[in-house]
Amino acid sequence: MVAVLSTIGLLMGLYVAWRLFWPLRMPTWLKVVLSLLLVGVAVQLRIVATFWGTMASPEIPKLAIATLATGSTAVLLLALVMLVLDAGLLASRLLRRPRAVAALRTRSLRPAAGVLALMVSGYGISQGMAVPQPRQIEVSIAGLPAAFDGYRVLQLTDIHASRLLTGDWVRRVVDESNALTPDLIVITGDLIDGSVEARRDDARPLADLRAPDGVVAITGNHEYYAQYQDWMQAFRALHMQVLENSHLQVRRGDAALTIAGVTDPVAARYGLPLPDLDAALAGADPSAPVILLDHRPRNAREAAARGVKLQLSGHTHGGQIIGMDQLVKRANGGFVSGRYDVDGMTLYVGNGAGLWAGFPARIGVPSEITLVTLRRAP
């Protein structure tokens, strides 16, 4: 994956530099310098990971991350714009439309597109760093005990505490979450980026999440990239109940609700337990409705077949940018954002509270804290 991302960044940088700088009237040495700078920005993740941290967790100052991310996102956007312009130019030549050819070869067109891409990218990074706003939904569940009608489950997912989304940001997310007064808080993976030592202060505010039935968490893929076992201990020290292919019960008198959680498929790389829904549900009360926490949404149909009533997932970040969601959807079983009816089960895929610092842009896909109110199905 690292090699793929680096190669894509390199190719985009070279293409944009070729189409943006080389048609301009300027000294060759200046074209070379500008091209090298642009390519460097396009592959900044690889450069930073080589010297400061990792691809999963760049360990450089917040302002540097935001600045480099603005540049690399602008290169991505500009590459897409350039492809459209060049495709239009080719079509115009084939169709012998000289006016269209002249318009698409206007010397100022591509520099203007570059400025626009940079502005849009800056906006996207600011949205990616914004504190998420609450989103409230209701989910009807057949067989839900009357005691749980109106039960409020708050979902946080993809917090990605990092050098970009620091402890102060996490504190504001915690405050927003507590203000919604949920009965239970669930965190569906990717809480952090980086080692326990590097993120200790950034993760500490999570200990102040408050709900009568506690805080339940599962792992995402990013926990495996740095000291998985140490993070599991750290999360428990922050008063979270971590579910690793296991479940717990929430009770209201004689009524019960089962909360189950599975691990992430990336565990295979590290010789750790793979997601196991059978193990997670082993011994569960067959009369209690099941809410499944699964970081990735793609196995929702399997969960529905096992009788799960509600699955809460994340991982996709909602696609982050309008249009890109269609690509993300294909890699996640056709699910990317919001509510889905999956063979009678409700799947909800949260857009995430935060983002990976390597690509922290949101354009038209807002972050969220999700409050799910359970209702008895008529």
Image (cartoon, helix red, strand yellow):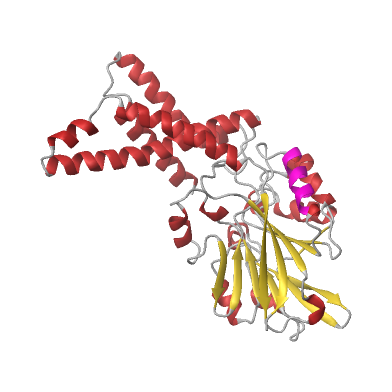
Residue 306 x/y as whole percent: 62, 81
Between 152 and 84, the residue placed more toward the observer is 152
In the rendered image, residue 351 lying in the magenta stretch gets the answer no
Q: From this viewpoint, is residue 79 visible?
A: yes
- Residue 81, by quadrant, is top left
Specify whether 161 is left or right of 316: right
Between 8 and 71, the residue placed more toward the observer is 71
- Residue 358, by quadrant, is top right
In the rendered image, residue 173 lying in the magenta stretch gets the answer yes
Query: What count of labels does the image hold?
Result: 0
Residue 169 x/y as whole percent: 72, 40
Residue 65 x/y as whole percent: 59, 33
Which residue is outermost to the front? 378
Where 9 sits versus 34, above or below? below
Where 20 sits versus 128, above or below? above
Specify whether 317 is left or right of 310: left
Which residue is outermost to the bottom? 287
Residue 216 x/y as whole percent: 77, 62
What stretch of residues is rendered in magenta?
A: 168-177
Which residue is outermost to the right? 253
Between 302 and 111, the residue placed more toward the observer is 111
- Residue 255, by quadrant, is bottom right
Specify whether 171 is left or right of 44: right
Where 338 sits versus 359, above or below? below
- Residue at point 58%, 81% (across, down): 305
Q: From this viewpoint, is residue 47 visible?
A: no
Between 223 and 166, the residue placed more toward the observer is 166
For the stretch drawn in magenta, the main secondary structure is helix
